[in-house]
Image (cartoon, helix red, strand yellow):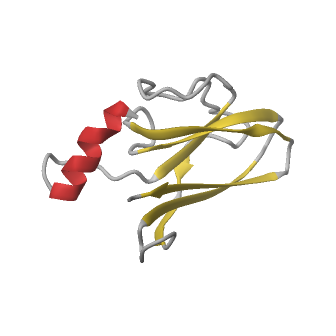
């Protein structure tokens, strides 16, 4: 996402008072991903699937610790259809670092949804 470049460069250079990307959100839109997007197309804020802090770690894809990984397990309290996922640097609003379409997933009351988002640096 274009808006995330300033955050990534600020974090890398420890300048500009940037906030790290530590939140995941899911949504209902299957609109194609575009670098100009600044939010999910239809972020879900109900049914236990609201944006939340993720477990953040570094994992190895090609080189040691070259991938940032965010993992979140939600427990649904109602039915929702999930079509997209994004990662953010705030619990609301903030900067969206990336967005991806998922396969269509209907999540029903009591079901858990585990999401993993990986950002590989190369």
Q: Which corner quadrant holds the N terminus?
A: top left
On screen, residue 103 versus residue 94, left or right, reads: right
Residue 53 percent coordinates (x, y)? 51, 53
In this view, which residue lies farthest toward the left? Answer: 15
Q: Position of residue 9 (x, y in %)?
A: 22, 48
Q: Is residue 78 visible?
A: yes
**Total numbered labels:** 0
120 or 96, which is in the foreground? 120
Quarter of image, res 35: top left
Is any atom of residue 18 visible in this view?
A: no
Query: Residue drawn at (60%, 25%), measured in percent from left and top?
Result: 32
Q: Quadrant location of the C terminus? A: bottom left
Q: Residue at x 56, y 42 (%)?
A: 51
Relative to 20, say whether 45 is above or below: above
Q: Residue at x 52, y 69 (%)?
A: 61
Corner quadrant of residue 82:
top right
Residue found at the very far bottom of the displayed protein: 64
Residue 54's x, y, as percent?
53, 57
- Viewer-side residue, 25 vs 77: 25
Q: Is residue 119 left or right of residue 48?
A: left
Q: Nearer the viewer, residue 56 or 44?
A: 56
């Amino acid at each position: 996402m274009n808006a995330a470049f300033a955050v990534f460069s600020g974090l890398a250079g420890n300048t500009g008072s940037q906030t790290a990307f530590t939140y995941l959100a899911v949504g209902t839109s299957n609109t194609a991903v575009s670098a100009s997007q600044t939010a999910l197309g239809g972020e879900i804020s109900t049914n236990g699937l609201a944006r939340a802090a993720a477990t953040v770690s570094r994992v190895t894809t090609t080189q040691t610790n070259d991938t940032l990984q965010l993992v979140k397990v939600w427990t649904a309290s109602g039915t929702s259809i999930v079509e997209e996922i994004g990662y953010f640097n705030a619990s609301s609003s903030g900067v969206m670092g990336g967005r991806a379409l998922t396969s269509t997933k209907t999540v029903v009351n009591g079901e858990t949804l585990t999401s993993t988002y990986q950002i590989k640096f190369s």
